Each structure stands twice: as C-alpha cells, then as structure tokens.
Amino acid sequence: MAVYKKTYRPYEGRLTASWSRFLVIRRYAFEDLRRSRFLTVFYLASFLYPLIAALIIWVQHNASALQLLNLNGASRLVPINAGFFMTVLGWQSMLALFLSAFVGPGQVSPDLTNNALSLYLARPFSRAEYVLGKLSVLLILLSLMTWVPGLLLFGLQGYLEGWSWMTDHARIAAGLFFGAWIWILVLALLALSLSAWVKWRPAAGALLFGVFFVGSGFGAAINTVQETQWGSLLNISNLMGTVWVQLFEGNDPTSNGALFFRVSAGGHLPVWCCWAALLILCGICLSMLSRKIRGAEVVR
Amino acid sequence: MEPVIELDGLEVRFGGRPILKKLNASLTGRSIGLLGPNGAGKSTLLNTLLGFHKPFSGTARVLGRDIRTHAREVRGWIGYMPENDAFIASMTGVRFVRLMAELAGLPPEQALERAHEAFFYVGLGEVRYRTLGTYSLGMKQSAKLAQAIAHGPKLLFLDEPTNGLDPPARARMIALIQEIRDRGDLRLILSSHLLRDVEECCDQVLILKDGNIAAHCDLEEERRSNRRFLELETRGASNGNFLEALEKLGCETAQGAQGRTKLVLPEGLEIRRLYELAAEQNVQIRRLNHKRDSLEDIFLKAMEAADGRL
C-alpha cells in the first residue's frame, strides 16, 4: 500500500521462523560496523600476518623459490610445527582483543543507554536470543581472524607436505580450532558484559584492556608478595597460554605458549585450574549479562 | 465479548514486597484504561503481562493465553509503547522501526514498507531518515507509537502515551489513539495517571491503588446511564405544576435550591419533550446539564477507600 494513504492496517502476511530472529540483530550490527572505515582497514590489516605465514609455508615447499632467494636452509630456520601455528594464533588473538575492545562496547550499551531493551524484549524474542544475536557478531568477526586463517594455513601446509603430515599433526588443527574458540568466547562474553555495565563506550573498551593487563600485573604482584603462583589465576593470558599448550602439545609440552600468551615463569598452574578459572570467568560474564539484560529494571 | 485480559489472583513481588496484590478481573473492553496514581502498579501490571516480571502467585491470560506458559506467543500479539524514552539514538527513525518489526517476525521487505507507513501514519514521514537522538520529545513519543504498531499487533499497550507532551502534541497523540481504536482492528490498553486521557480514549477502566483494584467500571455503560440523569435550572416553576407535569411524563424528580431540579428521564422520553412541557407551563429552562458521575467522581471515590478496595 502506498505510504500516502497514511492509515493503520493490521499485518496478515507470513512471519519469519522464530529461531532465526537473533540473526536480525547480527545483520543490523554488521551494517553498523561496515560504516566504520577504521574498523574495515584494521580488519583487513589483521590478515597480513596469516598472509606472511602462508608465504613462509609456500616458500618452504618451493625449492626454486628458496634457491632464487638463496635461502636453502630456511626450512630449518622457521620450522612449521605446533609452535609456528601457536604463534599465528597468538598474534591473531591479540589483534582479536583490540577488535573486541573496539566492537564490543558498541553492542549492548546503546540499547541500555536509551532503554531500548524493553522494546526488544516486548516482542517474541528472548533475552537469550538477544545475547546470542549480539554474541554472534563478535563470534563471527573473531572466528574469521583466528581459527579460520589458522586452519587454512594448516590445510595449506598439509596440502604441500602431504596427507600423512596432516594426520600426524591433527592435534595442531584441533588446538587451533578449540584454542581459538575458548579465547573468542572469553573475549566476546567479557566485551558484552562490560558493554552492559559500562555505558560509556571508550570506558568499556579501556576496561577490557584493563581486565587483561591490570589483571596480569595484579596477579604478578600477588605472586611476588605472597611467594605463590596462584596470583596467575588473575592473568588471563597466562591461563590461555596454559590451555593452549595443553591443546597443541598434550601433556608433554615442549614450549610455554606463544607471543602474548605465554605461561610466565613461576606462573605454572595445574591445567584444570586454568580451565576452571576460564569457565568461572565466563560464568561471571553471563551472570553480569543476565542482571542487565532485562525488559524492565526493578528498583527495590 | 472475549476477554482481552483476565487477571486470576495475580500477585507480583519485588524483593518480597508485594507490588500487585492478588488481582482478579476480567477486562473485555475494546480500549481499556489503567488508571491510578504514580506507584499504583500500572506499569508493573503491563510489564508482567509482557513477561518482564514473573508472577509470585496467580496468573493472567491475554486473549485467552496464559502468560506463564505462552509468554512468547502473547508477546507476538502485543505492540508496546513504554512510558520512558526507549530508542537507539544513533539509528534513523525508519531503520529503528524496521528493526523492531523484523524482531516481531516480519520479513525485511515488509518490515521496511510498514516502517515507512507507520512513520507517515504518526505524522513523522518527513523526519523518518533523521537519527532518533535528534528528535524532540513529542517526536520520540510518536516514534514509540510507530514501532508499537508497525508489526500490526492485535493488542496495543500504551504506557503514559502523552507524557511530557505540550497541549497540541497531546491532542495529536489522543486523536491518533482514538483513530486506531475506532478502526477496530486491535484492542488497546492505555495506562495513565491522567483522567482526561483515559476518558477520551477508553470504554472500560481499571483503577489501581497500592497494587489493589480500586475500581473496575465500564465507562461506556456509565456514559449511557448518565445520559438519563439531568439537572435543570428553571425560572417560573415555583408553584410545583411543572414538577407534577414532569412526573406525569414518567420522570423521577427532586427539587433542589434556587430553581434547580434533578430528574431521571424514563426510557423513550426525549429531552425535546421537556422544552415543550416548559413552554406549555410558561417556565423558562435556563440551564440543562447531564449530571454525569464522571470518571473523576469514580476515581475520587476509589481513592477515598482506605485500602484501595471498593
């Protein structure tokens, strides 16, 4: 009907599937994010390291390229092993932290600032779907930055090295996938929960960095003062490093993580403690979200 | 008429404190007013019907569906215009309404079409591409109404729709609500502490006080019955003949001071006949009022009751 008729009419057309409503939130969020030139440039730049890693893998398997560059011993300089892939994941994961600090605060806080949540939740749309919709924005962006390029690199290496290499090193692929997912979940939940509690976007972004860097500094201080290792429970990168080392290398690790996610000296914790700490952190974030994501705030 | 809302011992508590106290009522009107002073529980009742608060005991049914077991289905039928500001400041008006319509289940194309229609309907057609943060208070209220009707709900919840509006904006909002009501495609619940809003838009009213139902009345019925109550101010009717003649016509009469007469017209007797009778008796009718028991009277009576129960 033409808009000039200016009348109210009931809707009698078809409705979308109930389960798919959370995708609406994701679509609108991506439309908003696409408008940011800085984000687009940053996101594209974040694929530079995987491209370099792909080039390294290709060069190592290309005898003529090695000969041309006079790098016959290069394969020994940069071994393509668990450490190589952990380094790729570590670098990408750090970029993912920056991306989350930029994107995360803009997810929930605008809805809370002007009480839009009551409008979302007055529809056939649940709180869980709302969180899932917002979470999926970060999950997709961070996945494309972390485990997707990681597995593509693994596939390239396997293709060039042969099927037997792939089967022998399947643990690396599993480590890349699950290690990245744990990090993505922790980051996404933390970013959303901070966005729900801190309405000022720059402050929420800064707080995300604060949780990582201040937490690790505080943990190190506890370790030093109390002569203990349990302060490392506050160091999220330490926790992630421990979990990654176990995922990539099993129970007989040869490294202590990679780049920003190393197990610090004197910060060795039982692996189960690190898993538990990360789970508790996720639980706290979910609880924070649950307290804020409500149709109506109750003033007791 | 099928009840719009049935309250069945509905009790809501916040932190152990009862806010709605075992409410029982069946609301059947086409447009129902929720009236009460601030803090009476009007918004809490709407929020509970929307599933924002869990009932402590009892339940409620919206269009026959239990809010405890069919909350999602119930919300699918409702358009909600909240009391406070509710929008995303950085979004354009039409994009925001489209988002809300899509969340209600409309496919993107239909949602966009109806968002445009809704904006024109509420009189914001020219500003629909402006970000909501730049809207005036009146425009924000209209935008809230647009998002509430864009998906074509069966039931409209309007929580203080004229809050903060200047008189012309209020008149426009009331006219819109009346127009939506008169189309008859949907039922509406209007929560307000303003008697005039409710009186102008509603045919049934539920008055809340301190979480109790203080009164529940059918305004349409009241208006019909009040049309039979008259108060006359006359000159030249001091000998009582005029009263006698009125009683012969079947009127119940009572003589007041200073030439005032209260009377109840019998069914079928038109007011014109009173003027004819007055002319025959050489009596002047100087004033004729429908002596209504207005919503204000009903409200004040309800508020006078000690615990809010009549």
Image (cartoon, rainbow, N blue to C red):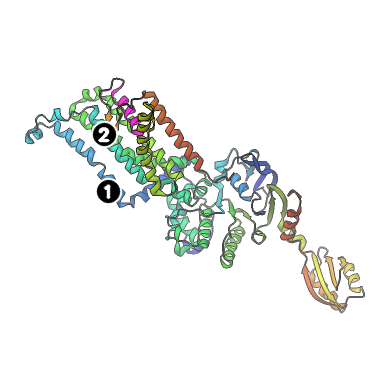
In the rendered view, would you say A68 is above or below A36?
Answer: above
Say which residue label 2 marks. A259
Q: Which mark is residue A74?
A: none
Q: Residue furthest bottom?
A: B282
Task: Say which element carries label 2.
Answer: loop
Q: Residue furthest top?
A: A252
Q: Nearer the viewer, residue B23 or B228?
A: B23
Q: Residue at x 25, y 41 (%)?
A: A47
In the rendered view, would you say B162 is above or below A58?
Answer: below
What x and y, as percent, mark residue B214? 72, 50
Q: Nearer the viewer, residue A9 or A148?
A: A148
What x and y, as percent, mark residue A228? 37, 26
Task: Say which element carries label 1.
Answer: helix
Q: How far is mark 1 from mark 2, CA to CA?
A: 23 Å
Q: Chain of mark 1?
A: A
In magenta segment, residue B290: no
Q: Nearer the viewer, residue A217 or B252?
A: A217
Residue type pointed to by label 1: Val
Say which residue label 1 marks. A41
In magenta segment, residue A239: yes
What x and y, as percent, mark residue B10? 66, 42
Residue type pointed to by label 2: Leu
Work out whether mark 1 precedes mark 2 in sequence or the reverse, and give the earlier one. Answer: 1
Left or right of B257 on screen, residue B21: left
Whether residue A124 is visible, yes or no, is yes
Callout 1 touching callout 2 (CB < 8 Å) = no
Which segment is the magenta one?
A: A236-254
